[in-house]
Amino acid sequence: MTLTIAPRVRALVLLLLAAACALLAGAGPASAHAAVTGSDPGQGAVVDKAPARISLTFSEQVAMSDDSLRVLDPGGKRVDTGKPSNISGTTYAVPLHPGLPDGTYTVAYQVVSADSHPVAGAYTFSIGAPSKTSVSVSGQSADDGVVGWLYGFGRYVSYAGFIVMAGGAAFVLACWRRGSGVRPVQRFVVSGWVALTAATLALLLLRGSFTGTGKVADVFDLSLLGQVLQTKTGAALVSRLLLLAAAALFIAVLFGAYARLSPTTPLTDGASRRQPDPGEDAQEKRDLTFGLSIGGVVVASGLAASWAMSEHASVGLQAGIAMPVDVLHLLAVAAWLGGLGALLVALYRAPADTPVDRPAVRRFSQIAFGSVLTLIATGTYQSWRQLGSWSAFTDTRYGQLLLAKIGLVVVMVGVAWISRRWTGRLAETAPVEAIAVREKERVGAGAEPAGDMATTDAGDGDAPATGDSDTDTDTDTDTDTDTDTDTDEHPGSERAAQLARQQAARDAARQKRMRDADPNRFGLRRSVLAEAGIAVVLLAVTTVLTQTEPGRTEQEAKAASSSSASASSGTGASGALTLNMPFDTGGEDGKGIVTVDLDPARVGDNEMHVFVERPNGRAFDIPEVKVEFTLTTKDIGPLPVVLDHMATGHWSANGVQIPMAGDWQVDVTVRTSDIDEVTVSKNAQIG
């Protein structure tokens, strides 16, 4: 919330920004959200005869069901004959009925990427010549519909619940221990637990329909729920529920035993807690504080890991580092935003005799500042993994959302600086009247109240001479009820208790007016409220960001799509054939695109050039690349091609013999290390 930027801190921030520049300048690819990087036949391609199968290549391995790949004829009837299968690396195929007639066919796919996000889409190709088709391929998005909206809302509520619960509890334990006995703060933290638990259960039910049909009727399908429980996302959600049971125990101790040991004032209902004996309870309180601190960090870290283990951080480049960094990022967000919410509740709803004091606000200021520094460091690393280049900030939706998030954080820091100024001026007026009330109740007083209240003999039943009429009326009503049973036995003590409650109510109201009249506290409340409002919007942007395809993957898909479009145009005026095939050997630096140029792509002698490039288009060398031709229909091949290394990322061969025309399968084997190797294939009409 409140931040003080000292010269050393400015130097640290500049150092982090410089590190961000260096990381982004040399950023390489990192997997997350799967995207289609190739297909055979290609999008919009026109082939002479019906293919035996349809294949799709993704940027990473995906999870498929029986209906993940569907091929529809011009009339909308399915023409695929079996389950999708993984034929090599990240390429998946489904067989087709033989002898398909000419016309335009639609390929629809719906898969789940390794980071748990559904990916859906469709494209068309034609056999013989294009034709009209009754199949609509528009609007095929996994996030469309009621189920998609509900799933997104559930994710927002789950993030908000975690932040409120973890951040609110941390604020009480680390900044304002007296707050453990304040009812509004207790309700704030418990509401976070309830929201997170309810959202987690809802996500479990919605997950099967969200990654499948998208129908509301399938939300309560137990067979789909069983399938979800066998996935990585299902395991993460179940783990989260188990950890929430431990969190419930933590909250019960924090607001139960720990609250009774903390320095306290009267409860809001007038009943007072015992005043602890320093010698008796000091050691017990220290032990309980230590145990709650360790247990809280473990439970909060486990809950944060349930997101990290199933989303963007769990796949791709440096996953072993990315997941702990993601956990740290979520914990920093919770400490900052959740603590901010708890502080807002304390400023507006805390009883007049238990105001949040300046030391508590200052302690939270220090925690918030450390959280912001942590967010800068972890956010820089995450941006490097998910963007990969400076251009992705403006050219991709993920980058644009990230810029919006950064802008909101900057605005929040600016408002926090204003809050810091109000904190420095915050008056700490001692609640003298509240202390007097506590002392009077502690000794069971029937003594005359100090100040502006005069009373008559406690036993004669007369009302006080002065006071708030509303309060007196309410109290008299309570007294009538209370004295039905024991007025005859102890009329004096009952009347004294009644007068003490009246005085306590008046003193509390007066203390609240005094507190709220402090202009510095009023200014702090307004600035914290502004921060909380920005935090709500910031959380919404963050939730959308976690469901958006990373900029690096989006750019890779666009590049592959452009290459595929060029290749699908077939032979140009010169008769040359170009095939672009993405590959991933699975090892370090194992991703790229191999391009095969065959000229003139006819029967007889041909000249071949092979180029190997990184996803960003930069040529690089690998230990070995091999090319083979196979004509399956004539049982010819594989025919190997001997390649000569010409330059960085460039191999060539002359006199490549193609014995007859046909639909040849071109297999390219790429080896990026001693053990990392993959073969990618594509069919091409030659001759």
Image: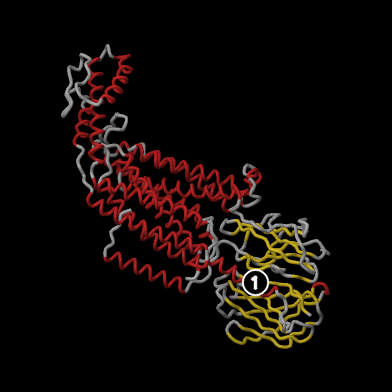
Which residue is rendered at x = 45% and y = 46% of the image? 161
Which residue is rendered at x = 29% and y = 41% of the image? 178
Which residue is rendered at x = 40% and y = 63% of the image? 377
Q: Which coloring applies here?
A: secondary structure
The one of 257 and 34 positioned closer to us in this rendering: 34
The answer, for residue 63, to whether it is visible in the render is no
The answer, for residue 630, to whether it is visible in the render is yes
Which residue is rendered at x = 27% and y = 45% of the image? 522
Q: Which quadrant: the C terminus?
A: bottom right
Residue at label 1? Answer: 678
In this view, 494 is above or below 339:
above
Instruction: Give the secondary structure at mark 1.
Output: strand
Q: Tell me residue 343's x, y (percent).
A: 33, 46
In this view, 279 is above or below 12:
above
In this view, 350 is above or below 32:
above
Looking at the image, the residue that sits furthest to the front is 132
Q: Quadrant of residue 581?
A: bottom right
Q: Tell me residue 276's x, y (percent).
A: 26, 35
Q: Tell me residue 676's x, y (percent).
A: 60, 72
Amino acid marked by disc 1: Val
In this view, 24 is above or below 533:
below
Q: Quadrant of residue 268?
A: top left
- Disc 1: CA contacts within 10 A as few (<14), some (14-19) or many (>=20): some
Q: Is residue 605 left or right of residue 440?
A: right
